[in-house]
Amino acid sequence: MEINTTQYRHCDVLTLKGRIDSSTAPQFEQAIKFATDQARYKIVLDMSGLEFMSSAGLRVLVNAQKICRRYNRGEVVLAEVPPNIKSALDLSGFTPLFKVFGDKLTAVGNF
């Protein structure tokens, strides 16, 4: 798995590539923790290069949303979600927890 972080004035964009499973979920969690430790609570996850996300990755997503929304500081939004991951979010009931955008530019513009 590969994670690239780009900091903008109003938000951070994490571009995800590869697979997020039980072995790579801690790396994903550390990338989000790095942003939130710097008081950057507005996060866009660009999932265009993501091939697979296991339940471990979904857990990291939900925990990140809890941290970012606490005290109304920000939120995690998703951009360019692949169909297989979108269906996993739907099946798990997590879709209402996240704003989903068709492209990264619109997601960044949300903030």
Image (cartoon, rainbow, N blue to C red):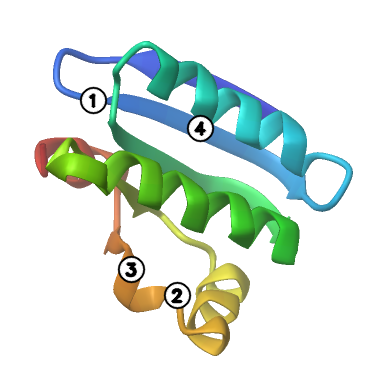
Which residue appears at 59% of the width and 49% of the height?
A: 60
- Tell me which label, 2 or 4, sits earlier in the chain: 4
Q: Where does label 2 land, which residue?
A: 94
In whole angstroms, how far apart are the C-alphas of marks 2 and 4?
Answer: 20 Å
In whole angstroms, how far apart are the C-alphas of marks 4 and 3?
Answer: 20 Å
Q: In which quarter of the image is residue 51?
A: bottom right
User: Where the N terminus falls, by quadrant?
Assistant: top right
Task: Report the front residue among 82 and 22.
Answer: 22
So how many labels did they put on this image?
4
In whole angstroms, how far apart are the C-alphas of marks 2 and 3?
Answer: 5 Å
Mark 3 vs 1: CB contact within 8 A: no
Mark 1 vs 2: CB contact within 8 A: no
Type of amino acid under label 2: Phe
Type of amino acid under label 3: Leu
User: Element under label 1?
Assistant: loop
Q: Is disc 2 surrounded by few (<14), some (14 to 19) or many (20+) residues within 10 Å?
A: some
Q: Is disc 3 surrounded by few (<14), some (14 to 19) or many (20+) residues within 10 Å?
A: some
Q: Is disc 4 surrounded by few (<14), some (14 to 19) or many (20+) residues within 10 Å?
A: some
- Tell me which label, 4 or 3, sits earlier in the chain: 4
Q: Where does label 4 land, which residue?
A: 15
In whole angstroms, how far apart are the C-alphas of marks 3 and 1?
Answer: 18 Å
Mark 2 vs 3: CB contact within 8 A: yes
Q: Where is residue 35 in the image (x, y as percent from the top left)?
A: 42, 20
In whole angstroms, how far apart are the C-alphas of marks 1 and 2?
Answer: 22 Å
Type of amino acid under label 4: Thr
Q: Where does label 1 land, which residue?
A: 11
Type of amino acid under label 1: Cys
